[in-house]
Amino acid sequence: MSAPTPISTGHEGTVRDQFRSYIQRVRGGDMGSLPAILALVVLAALFASLSPYFLTTGNIANLFVQASELTVLACALVFVLLLAEIDLSAGVTAGSGMAVFQVLFGVLGWNWIVALLLALAAGAVIGAVIGFFVSRIGVPSFVVTLGLFLGLQGFMLLLLGDGGIYRLEQPELKAIMNSNMPVWAGWAMLAIAVFGSFGLGLSDRMRRTKVGLPTRPFIMLIFKVAAIAILGGLVVLLLSVNRGQALLAIEGVPIVIPIVLIILVVGTFVLDRTVFGRYIYAVGGNPEAARRAGIKVAQIRLYAFIICSTLAVVSGLLHASRIGSIESTAGRTIVLEGVAAAVVGGVSLFGGRGRLAYAAVGALVISIIDNGLGLIGLPAGANFLITGGVLVAAATIDALSRRRSGVSIMRT
Amino acid sequence: MGTPLIELTNVIKNFGPVDVLKGVNFTVEEGKVTALVGDNGAGKSTLIKGLSGVQPFDGGKVMFRGEEVNVRSPRQASAMGIEVVYQDLALCENLDIVQNMFLGREEKFGGTLDEAAMEFAAQKALQSLSVRTVKSVRQKVSSLSGGQRQTVAIARSVLRNAKMVILDEPTAALGVAQTEQVLNLVRRLADNGIAVLIISHNLADVFEVADNVSVLYLGQMVAHLKVKNTNRDEVVAYITGSKSMTGVA
Ligand SMILES: Nc1ncnc2c1ncn2[C@@H]1O[C@H](COP(=O)(O)OP(=O)(O)O)[C@@H](O)[C@H]1O
Ligand SMILES: [Mg+2]
């Protein structure tokens, strides 16, 4: 008997073969954030044609800053959505973290860094409480976090007082959303991203070669790095132009952008390249299979809720930085936009499918709708209607693509 | 003939007042496919749960390669080299074949997942079983057919260096062609020196793939037969209880 040809690893073949198998995966219902990216392009074109202000550098910078808050919240939610859970309290958790910060920093006069770390710790504690009820007791996360959604609003009112609004004075914190890096730093950031992704791609290839596995055509890595360089370069270029109206120059990449990128990169690394990340996907896909494989399912759930709530506080910080104040009513509605962003970006509500990058794309879509409708002067009501419609459309695509992969099982 | 991999002597299991296994004697040999048959409720599942440590036996002797062992947990069974492929397979559909095969036993390289090493090992394991039906080891399980999933679940046990693989009704949900594929795979497992224990309701499958067949009737082992020395009618007679001890009419 002749030796059987090895089973493919998906890395064989020419660029054309690779492209073809990608198309096949998309047809099979594995669309990722393709619909959201298309929506992004269509919306950008639409708003650009409707408002002359939409494509100005000032508005683009604005858009990114607005989207960053939502991106971080949506990323937080991805960790629990991947487990087919939900955290309806993420928005008020964000607000509660900042309320804790205000009490420690503003009232008690503690060092702002210590206060901030304790605010994040408060988020972690909230996550641990949710995780405890969900994973150890078995209360549905929908119910636990709905309870916390109300409870934490009370917590914030008690800490900050009815109608309490406090200025956020700390210059380092205000700068996050309201100041820009020097122009050179933006280019340095891009260089790190380009060389980093090239280096990672190279080291993955070397590892495969060493083990004796085929690698994708080298040109594909070049394409990928070039795409990052060109798209990233375009954004950095736009943000490096002086967008100030008056004498004072406003230029450079907003400080929040590298912060969001670091969260995206580190989070993606954890999800894609660590055992913990693998177990999150496994538990989200089939908890019983995960349990039988020896995975401590309850522990994974607990950690996911802790990560979600802690990251939520980061988004709370971004929000407070942008509006320059900490309020006792913050975060009540943003969680729905956060879920919408994740789902619109292609994160499945059924668990096991999604990436942080999808959440970022989804957050851009939601933010563009918000920003664009504001520019063309539609009333706020229209904004809610359209955003809600987009969420339902995205959830429909999610359900349909899930059904399609189910159907293909039955067909074979 | 050498020592069998597993030898059970007078094994007992009861659930409260109900005696489910009433002194079972049973052997499984390396490199052979042993079929375990019997009517519903005969105690087949209870027997494999005891072997795999899910529900330890209450009494009797279990010898593993000639040494007495006491299997108390699935982890322990797995460490000894006993792997079970359950009827529901327990695969994560959202993960690919490699990820499923290494689930819970991931290889690491500098603290992160060593995808390359796992991919290579999964490819080799499938190749050693002459699996040709899957297109790519990076295919998601959701895109696989029932037979292909069964293949992945079986190959996973090979990766774990199983000395004995227990299959609970592996062909129950499959069509004709896929049943054939899985039976071929079962045969190759044994040809690679693994002791295979297969539970099946389908006597056609049993006669196609097994070397030995043991019949459980109401918690007692009533026959150990060589497939080449028996026939369908005889096995059915033992299953239904119309024939009671080997050699006795
Ligand atoms: N956990 C249990 N508690 C009580 N009775 C059980 C339990 N598991 C199995 N049994 C009984 O043991 C007998 C044998 O069951 P089982 O091993 O599942 O048979 P088979 O797999 O051969 O159909 C049945 O009568 C069943 O009701
Ligand atoms: Mg059974």
Image (spheres, coloured by chain):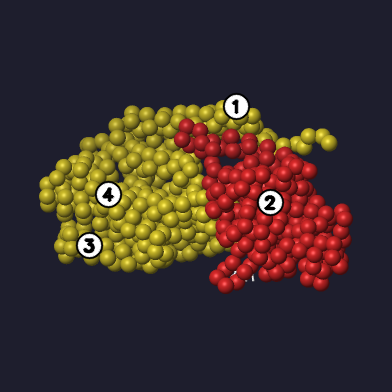
Chain colours: A yellow, B red
The disc placed on residue A121 is: 4
Chain label for disc 2: B
- State the separation of the CA atoms marked 2 and 4: 56 Å
Kind of residue at disc 2: Glu
- State the separation of the CA atoms marked 4 and 3: 16 Å
Give the residue at x 29% y 35%: A181
For disc 4, the neighbor class at 10 Å (few under 14, some 14 to 19, many from 20) is: some
| The residue at label 4 has a CB less than 8 Å from ligand 1 | no
Q: Mark 1 = which residue? A: A210
Q: Mark 3 = which residue? A: A155
Quadrant location of the C terminus of chain B in the rendered image: bottom right
In contact (CB < 8 Å): disc 3 and disc 2: no
Question: In front here: A360 or A313?
Answer: A313
Q: Given this view, does label 4 or label 3 mark the residue nearer the observer?
A: 4
For disc 1, the neighbor class at 10 Å (few under 14, some 14 to 19, many from 20) is: few
Kind of residue at disc 4: Ala
Kind of residue at disc 1: Lys
| Pointer 2 and pointer 4 on the same chain | no
Kind of residue at disc 3: Phe
Q: Mark 2 = which residue? A: B7
Q: Given this view, does label 3 or label 2 mark the residue nearer the observer?
A: 2
Could you tell me if residue B206 is visible in this image? Answer: yes
Q: Is residue B53 above or below residue A149?
A: above
Q: Given this view, does label 1 or label 3 mark the residue nearer the observer?
A: 1
Chain label for disc 4: A
**Residue A410 image offset from top left, x and y in percent:** 69, 61
Q: Given this view, does label 2 or label 4 mark the residue nearer the observer?
A: 2
**Residue A343 image offset from top left, x and y in percent:** 47, 57
Circle 2 sits in a helix, a strand or a loop, which is it?
Answer: strand
